[in-house]
Amino acid sequence: MEQHITIDGVIVPFKPGETIMQAASAANIYIPHLCHHPEFKPHGSCKLCTVNVNGRNCSACTFPAEFGQQVLNQTDELNKLRLRIIQMLFVEGNHLCPACEKSGNCKLQATAYQLGMLDSHFPHFYKAHEVDSSHPDLMLDRNRCIFCTLCVRASRDVDGKEIFEISGRGINKHLVVNSPSGKLHDSGMEMDDRAADICPTGALLVKRQGFSVPIGKRTFDNHEISEDLDEQ
Amino acid sequence: MNIETVVNSLIQAHGAKATQLLQILNGLQAQFHHIPEDAITLVAEQLRISPAHIVSLIEFYSFLSITPRGDYEILISDSITDRMIGNRDIIDQLCNRLGVEQGVLRDDGRVSINTTSCTGMCDQGPAGLINGLTITQLTSDRIDEIIKLIEASVPLERWPEHLFAVSDNVQQRGLLLENDYTKGDAIRATFERGREKTLDELTSSALRGRGGAGFKTAMKWHFCHESYTTGDTDGDLGLICDSPSNHVTADCDRIVVCNADEGEPGTFKDRLLLTTHAHQLIEGMTVCAAIIGSCKGYIYLRGEYRYLLDALEAMLAERREQNLLGDNILGEQFHFDVEIRLGAGAYICGEESALIESLEGNRGIPRNRPPFPVTNGYLNKPTVVNNVETFVCAAAIAEKGGSWFAQYGTEQSTGSKLLSVSGDCARPGIYEFTFGISVHEILDRCGADLDLLGIQVGGPSGTFITADEFERKIAFEDLATGGSFIIFNSSRNLFDIVQNFTHFFSHESCGFCTPCRVGTTLLTRQFDKIHAGHGSAGDLVELEEIGKIIQAASHCGLGQTAANPILTTLARLPNLYHMQLKQIGFEPGFDLDSSLDTARRLTARDDLDAHLKQREQ
Amino acid sequence: MSSKIRVATTSLAGCFGCHMSFLDIDERFADLVELVEFNRSPITDIKECAESDIGLVEGGVCNAENVHVLREFRNKCKILVAVGACAINGGLPAMRNHLPLQACLDAVYLDGTGVTNPQIPNDPELPLLLEQVHPIHEIVNIDYSLPGCPPSADVFWKFLTDLIAGREPTLPAELVHYD
C-alpha cells in the first residue's frame, strides 16, 4: 500500500520526501499559507500553515509527511490561531486596502477573507517604512512587506541576481535591496524577472498596471483563495 | 588605521571564506567601533558575497554597528539582577559625568554608552563590557576610576587589571568540579576501551544535555555517527582535512560543536567551566569526535565572553603541542582539531540550529527541523551540538565509566548540575548539586531568606516558582534548568521582573516568524499598558491570549518560551495582576493627553478642550 | 414607537461614504424604519445621543472631539459597531501617521502652495488633532466590525436584520471585503 497520512480524518497519500503541504495540495486540501509557493524551497516563517501533527503544532509547508501522521488542519482552534497571526501581519505593516493597487488580487487580503478577519484586533504599529519608486517599471512599498521572502528566493534561485535580502532583527526586520544606492533602479532588477511578480501583497508591484481590472472581476472578487489551489 | 590594511589582515587571519564573515566583522568592529562602508565593499569583493548580506549581519548582531560607536564603547548589562543592584545608577553616573546620552555617540566620538542583555556576571554585578571586555562589580568608585581613565585617553591595555577581574565564585563543588583529572586521560581511556564501548558507557551513564532540553547525549552521538554525510565539501574543514599528509576519510565530514553561547539571563556556570575546566571540555569534544568520526570541532563562544578567548586559544595551542589535538592524537590514527568562533550579541544563537547558521557566517535564524543537526548540521554535515557542561560530563564519563556517573542523581536525571545562583541571597555564585536536590536545600546553602516573592528557575525561558513549590526538585522530570537560579525576596516588584524578561525576549527575537516577531512586541506593549496602570479586566485576558499564541505557533524555543515570564507568574500570582488593573472600563494603551502635545504647542492652547482624560470620570 | 430598536450613527474621521452606502439600501429603508428609530445621526440631526440599542460608528479617531463623541456612543449604545475601514484600522486618514503631526500642519497651513497669511488655526472651537489617527477599538471596546470602504448596503442590511431578529450577526464571504 502507498504511504499516506490523514488530514482531518481524510486519508491523503504522499510520496517520500513530500511535505504535509505538498501532500495536501495534491489532494486538493487547502491549508492557509502566505510564504509558501510550490515553485520555491519552503521557508516556514509566516506560520499561517500551522497544523497539528500527532498533537504538536508544526508548519505544514516545511514538515515532512510521514506514514501514520494524524494531521489536524481545519479546526476552530487552529483557525483562530491563524486569524490572530494574520491580524499580527496587518497591524505590523500598513495594509490600507482601499489605497492599494493589489487589492482584489492580494493573497494577504484573500487569506484574511478566508480566515474570516473582520477587524485588526491588535493595536496598529503605524511604523513608517521606506517606499522605493526609483525604478522606471517597478515600485517597492515596504509598508506592505510581510517578509515571506518570495522575492528573495525568486531573485536568488530563478533570476540568479540576489537583489533582495532580509536585514535587521526582531521587529526591526526589513527588506533591503542589493544595489549601490540601496534602491531598485540600480539593482539590475527587470520587469520580467521572476521576482517582479511573485509578491503575494502589494509590496512589489509592476508600475502602470494598477486598477486595470475593474472591481468585481479581480482574482479574489468572486472566489475564495482556498478554491484556487492551482494558482498557488 | 587604513581600512584596506585591516580588512586584508583580517581576511589573512581568518581565511577568505564566507563562513568567516562574522569573525571578520567582529575584527572590524573592534578596530573601528563600527563597520565602515568601504570595509563592507572590500569584504564583499574578497569573500564574493553581496554587500546586502554583510549589512544584514551587521543589523542582526547587537555588537556590530553600521554607525560609529565610541572609541570607548561601554555596554552595561541589563539583566534583572544588574537592575536590582542599581545598574541604572551606574549608567546615570557614566552618562552624566562623561557628558553623553545613552545610545548616542558623544560629539567627539570618544564614548558611547548603552545597555546590553545579561553578560553572565550576575554573581558579581553590576557588570558590563568595555570594547568587548568584561568589567564587573561596578561600584560608584570603580565608575569614577573608569571615567578618569577614559578622560585621560588611557588605552585599554594599560587599564589596571582589577577592573577586568572575574571571580570564579565557586560556592560548592560536586562530582564534576571535584574530579581530579590528568590531561589526556579521557582520550586514553576511550582508545583503551574502544570507541563503541565508550559510547556504551555514555549510554549507561544516561547523561542528558545540560543546555536545558535534556536530550540523551549518547543517542545524539549515535545518530550523528550513523548519519550519511550529504554535506558540501567546500574545503572549510580546515587544516586537518585539507592537509595532504593526512588520511582523509569520509569520517571527516562530521562536526563537533560546543555551544558556549551561555545567554540565558542569570546563567554563568559555563563561564567557570571555560575558565577552569577548558581542558576537560576539549577532552569531551575529542572523545565525541573519536566516537562519531569527526576531525573538526568548533567552540561557539558568546561575544560577551570575549575576555576568555586568548586563554582558550593558548590552551588549544598547548594541547596541540602535547599531541592531544591535531594529527595522530596520542599516536592513534585519529585527527581532530578545534577552532573557536566568537558570537556578537545574539541570544538566539544559543539555539543549536541558529548557532550553526551563525557559525556559517549567517544571521542566527533557527532552521526548520527536521532535518536535525545530527544529520544536516554545519555546512549540511552531520553535527553534534552540545553544551559546555555536557562535554565536561562526557569527558568524566569516558574516564570513569557510566555507572560511576549514574550512581548520582535521580533515575531520569543522572549526575550533577551546575547552578548559577544570583539575586537575593547571602552567597551568590556557582553551586554543583547532584540532581534531585530540592529548592529548599539550595536556598539553605546559598543563604537565602525564606520570605521570598519567588525564584526564577531556568532563566526567563524557564519557570517562576513561589513558596509552596520549594520542595520541588531540580531534575528534568520536575524543575528542568539550564542552570539559572535567580532569587527574589519579598520586597521585589513582580512587574519589574516580568517586564525585564518580556522586553528581553522581544529584543532578542530574531524576527523570522510572525508570532514571535510581532507577538513579542504586542506582548511587551500589552504588559507595559497593565504595568503602567492602564489595564482593565479585558486587557489581562488579552495579555494571556497573546502569550498563548506566541507559545503555540512560534518557530523555535525562544518564541515558545517568550511568554513564560507572564504565563507562569499569572498562573501563580493572579492577585498581583488583578490588583494592577483599573476597576472599571477600558483605557487606551497610549497616553491620550500627550497625544495632543504637538497640537497644543502649535496652537498655543491650554484651555479645557485642549486636554483629554485617559478615561472618563 | 417605544418597542422599536433605537439606532444611532456618527462619522468621526471618515468621509461619510459609509453613511452614503447605508442609504444605498434604498427601498429597504422603508422596511427598516418600521423596525428601528434613529437617534443621534446625520439622518435625524439629533445632536446628543440618547440611550440606544445599536451605535454605528464610521471613521477613525483623529482629534479630541472624536474621542468625546466615541465615548458618548460607547456610554449610550448597548452594541457598538465599527463601520468601515477607517473605524477598523484608521483607513486613509491614517496615512498621515507616518508623518509627524507638525509636518502635516506645516504642509497644509504654512508651506502649502497658494497659502496666504500662513497660520495654524487655533480657534478654541476647533478640536485639536491627535498625534496619530487611531482605529476606534484602541479607544473604547467594540462589539462588532463591518469591514469595507465602504461596506456595501447589503452588509448594513444583513447585519441589522440579523441583530433585529435576535440572531448573532454573520456576514457571508461574498459580503466581506476591505476595499
Image (cartoon, coloured by chain):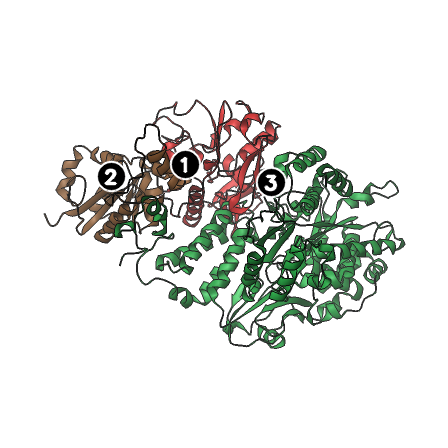
Chain colours: A red, B green, C brown
- Write down the residue under mark 1: A109
Helix, strand or loop at disc 2? helix
On the picture, is B100 further left or further right than B329? Answer: left
- Label 2 marks a residue whose chain is C
Residue extending furthest right? B331
- Label 1 marks a residue whose chain is A
On the picture, is A198 further left or further right than B442? Answer: left
CA–CA distance in space, label 1 to label 2: 21 Å
On the picture, is B611 further left or further right than C6? Answer: right
Q: Nearer the viewer, residue B24 or C171?
A: B24
Please tell me if label 3 and label 1 are on a single chain.
Answer: no
Q: Can you tell which mark lies on residue C156?
A: 2
Q: Where does residue B176 sit, x and y in percent of width and height?
A: 73, 67
Helix, strand or loop at disc 3? helix
Q: Can you tell which mark lies on residue B56?
A: 3
Quadrant of res B29: top right
